[in-house]
Every structure is written in structure tokens, then in C-alpha cells.
Image (cartoon, grey):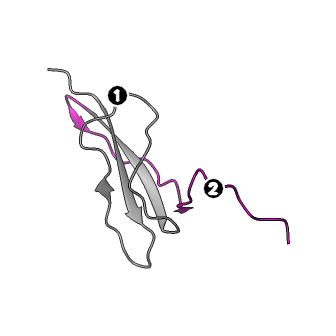
């Protein structure tokens, strides 16, 4: 049986906190994925694990911190 795809993991960025949790319940067959239910203004980092019949890979490097923002609202930054 072929079970291959990706698991996206997230963790909040906090001093000393290392707690990666999956954001998808089923393996993702594509190389893009939209993460929902994030809290605006929270700071989160992501990583990916490839999974196939042999098992999971080592996790990718972290994306580094990302601040969650509403994608619909335009920035009010005016360069000041």
C-alpha cells in the first residue's frame, strides 16, 4: 500500500519551548498547503516531514519565525 506525502508541523515561537505539532490530519500529496485556524499576531514556525512506506524522514529545517497576519487586510505601514 502506498502512503506517501507530507506532514506539516508548527510550533509557537517561545523561549525554550520545543513542541512541534502536525497541522494536517492526512498526508498532503502536493508541495503546497494552506494552514488554517492560526491566531492573528501569534509568532509561529513551520517544518515538513516527508512520509512514505518506509516511514517518516527527518524534519526539514524550520522556516524561522512568521507573524500571523490577516491576508485580506492591507498593510497600513506608510514608511514612517
Residue identifier under label 2:
73
Task: Relative to 14, say whether 44 is above or below.
Answer: above
Q: Residue furthest bottom?
A: 15
Of residues 76 and 13, which is closer to you in this image?
Answer: 76
Distance from Cα at disc 1 to Cα at disc 2: 30 Å
Q: Which callout, 1 or 2, points at the residue further toward the start of the chain?
A: 1
Q: Secondary structure at mark 2?
A: loop
Q: Residue furthest front?
A: 73
User: Picture coordinates of residue 78 (x, y %)?
Assistant: 83, 65
Residue identifier under label 1:
29
Asked if the stretch drawn in magenta spans residue 56, the answer is yes
Q: Quadrant of residue 29?
A: top left
Which residue sits at x=27%, y=28%? 4
User: Picture coordinates of residue 54 (x, y %)?
Assistant: 20, 31
Which residue sits at x=19%, y=28%? 53
- Quadrant of the frame with the N terminus: top left
Residue 73 lies left or right of residue 1; in this view the side is right
User: Picture coordinates of residue 37 (x, y %)?
Assistant: 38, 55
Q: Nearer the viewer, mark 1 or mark 2?
A: 2
Task: Relative to 46, say whether 57 is above or below.
Answer: above
The reply to whether the C-beta atoms of the residues labelled 1 and 2 are less than 8 Å apart is no
Residue 38 lies left or right of residue 51; in this view the side is right
Q: Secondary structure at mark 1?
A: loop
The magenta segment is 52-80
Asked if the stretch drawn in magenta spans residue 21, the answer is no
- Quadrant of the frame with the C terminus: bottom right
Amino acid at each position: 500500500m502506498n502512503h506517501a506525502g507530507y506532514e506539516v508541523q508548527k510550533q509557537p515561537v517561545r523561549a525554550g519551548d520545543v513542541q512541534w505539532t502536525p497541522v494536517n490530519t492526512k498526508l498532503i500529496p502536493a508541495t503546497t498547503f494552506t494552514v488554517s485556524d492560526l491566531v492573528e499576531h501569534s509568532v509561529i514556525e513551520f517544518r515538513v516531514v516527508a512520509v512514505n512506506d518506509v516511514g517518516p524522514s527527518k524534519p526539514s529545517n524550520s522556516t524561522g519565525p512568521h507573524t500571523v497576519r490577516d491576508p485580506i487586510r492591507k498593510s497600513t505601514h506608510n514608511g514612517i
